[in-house]
């Protein structure tokens, strides 16, 4: 016997209802996403067709789709259309691992799309965080990473000169594994700042998005057990592919 969720979703809205059309369309799409019969179908790829079938405007359909894309339930592929999203990557702030270690723990195979290493002169916030004179050289590591099918995160990391990275390390290995095993540097504490932003042209090109699409920006400050700075990291995540969960307990 089929459960209520598994019943076929009736593809219609009530034009006489006081509920706004865009809200009805959004709720219809949510039911379609939840319905098991809809999971493997590209039902959201053509806005014009959806609008015609529902007897509403294309803007009404787009408004509903944009809301679901923003929540990560759908994914919009430039030049292709809008489709059901794969399971979004979900990271928890209380269980801190390197990105590679966390994805491996979740059974998600990660692809490195690009990897660039450079030595730059530390200035501004980076020099202040590392407590080094401005102009001192630090290693900069840039990586675009994601699933096999598309990238969803762009990382920029800067490392304190004390760490001893040369740039010749095998960065296909987990970063903190490299620091610990190759350079005897243990990371203990991470302080993070999380904010919402939109992709500029450069970031959109890197993550295969449209300029103006929502992104999650995460700034991470990493310390060793002695409280000394190790890494200054910036992460830019596609909002349609990543969920950041904060879990805390109240102390009594």
Image: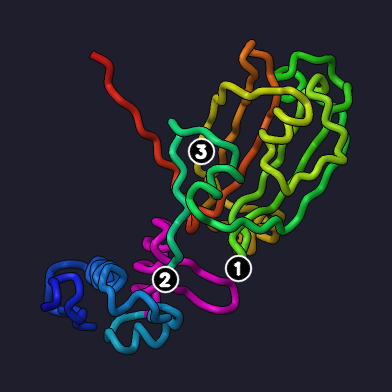
Instruction: Check the picture and name the quadrant holding the C terminus.
Output: top left
Farthest front residue in view? 181
Tell whether 197 sits left or right of 119. left
Above or below, comparing residue 70 to residue 93 in the picture: below
Q: Which residue is mark 1?
A: 149
Q: Position of residue 243 (x, y in %)?
A: 44, 48
Image position of 179 with respect to 76: above or below? above
- Secondary element under disc 3, as helix, strand or loop, is strand
Q: Is residue 169 left or right of residue 175?
A: right
Q: Could you say which quadrant of the image residue 130 lies in?
A: top right
**Helix, strand or loop under label 2:** strand
What's the image's color scheme? rainbow
Question: Is residue 22 something that shows in the picture?
Answer: no
Q: Which residue is mark 2?
A: 84
Task: Tell me which corner region of the image, top left, top right, bottom left or bottom right, holds residue 233.
Answer: top right
Give the magenta part as a residue range. Answer: 58-83
Q: Which residue is mark 3?
A: 195
Please tell me whether mark 1 sits on a helix, a strand or a loop: loop
Q: Nearer the viewer, mark 1 or mark 2?
A: 1
């Amino acid at each position: 016997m089929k459960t209520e969720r598994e019943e076929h979703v009736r593809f219609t809205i009530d034009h006489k209802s006081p509920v706004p059309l865009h809200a009805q369309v959004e709720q219809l799409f949510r039911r379609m996403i939840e319905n098991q019969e809809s999971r493997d179908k590209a039902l959201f790829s053509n806005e014009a067709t959806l609008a015609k079938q529902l007897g509403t405007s294309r803007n009404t359909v787009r408004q509903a789709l944009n809301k679901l894309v923003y929540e990560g339930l759908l994914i919009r592929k430039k030049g292709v259309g809008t489709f059901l999203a794969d399971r979004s990557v979900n990271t928890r702030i209380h269980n801190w691992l390197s990105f590679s270690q966390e994805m491996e723990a979740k059974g998600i195979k990660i692809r490195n799309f690009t990897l660039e290493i450079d030595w730059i002169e530390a200035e501004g916030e980076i020099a202040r965080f590392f407590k080094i004179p401005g102009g001192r050289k630090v290693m900069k590591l840039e990586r675009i990473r994601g699933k096999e099918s598309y990238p969803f995160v762009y990382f920029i990391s800067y490392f304190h000169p004390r760490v001893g990275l040369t740039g010749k390390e095998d960065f296909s290995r987990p970063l903190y594994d490299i620091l610990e095993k190759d350079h005897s540097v243990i990371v203990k504490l991470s302080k993070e700042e999380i904010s919402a932003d939109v992709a500029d042209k450069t970031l959109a090109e890197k993550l295969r998005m449209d300029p103006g699409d929502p992104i999650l920006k995460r700034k991470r400050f990493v310390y060793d057990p002695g409280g000394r700075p190790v890494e200054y990291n910036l992460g830019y995540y596609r909002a349609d592919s990543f969920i950041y969960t904060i879990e805390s307990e109240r102390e009594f």
